[in-house]
Image (cartoon, rainbow, N blue to C red):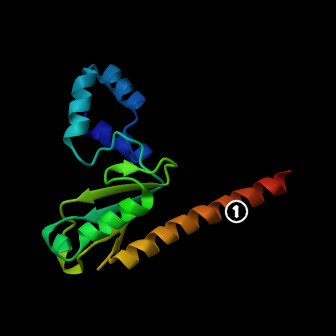
Amino acid sequence: LLSILQDIQEKYNWLPQEALRLVSEKICVPLIDVYSVATFYRAFKLVEPGKHNITVCMGTACHVRGSPSVLNRFEEKLHICAGQTTPDKNVSLETVNCLGCCALAPVVVVDGKYNAQTTIQKADKILTEIIQSKKEKRKSIKRKSHKTK
């Protein structure tokens, strides 16, 4: 079951409810048991994540060096709390207990890229870059649609 859920997570980047139902039927395991496994492991996501993922380390070293302020800034600017995704599905915000790179504290991971010694100003820059990439993508889509008309 675990390897099946990992495969689904890898393909979709989350575990859609319909996929969990299908797994339950195919391997003859009650749906409640499938959900028990899926919710036991934090790596599994039961809610569709945003296009961009921001992870703020809240470990001791990061906490002492300002990660709560950085997290608050992300929450304030995105209008969501840790564990949520923006309504437009552009950004998911989460926290972890430790990323294992305490010398770089506070650490924020954005789409797999580690950002060391993250300040509120760096958090603002990260958000600006994400917003800018969304605007550029929209412009690109508009240009392509005009060319096809």
Q: Is residue 93 left or right of residue 2?
A: right
Q: Tag 1: Cα neighbours inside 10 Å, few (<14), some, or many (≥20)? A: few
Residue 46, given in percent of the width and then of the height, sits at 34, 39
Residue visible at 18% across and 60% down in the picture: 97
Residue behind mark 1: 139
Which residue occupies the foreground of this view, 27 or 37?
37
Quarter occupied by residue 98? bottom left
Q: Is residue 45 above or below residue 53?
A: above
Residue visible at 36% across and 56% down in the picture: 93
Residue 123, given in percent of the width and then of the height, sits at 39, 72
Which residue occupies the foreground of this view, 17 or 95?
95
Q: Is residue 94 above or below residue 34?
A: below
Q: Is residue 128 left or right of residue 7?
A: right
Does residue 88 appear anywhere in the picture? Answer: yes
Q: Is residue 130 left or right of residue 59?
A: right
- Which residue reaches farthest left? 60
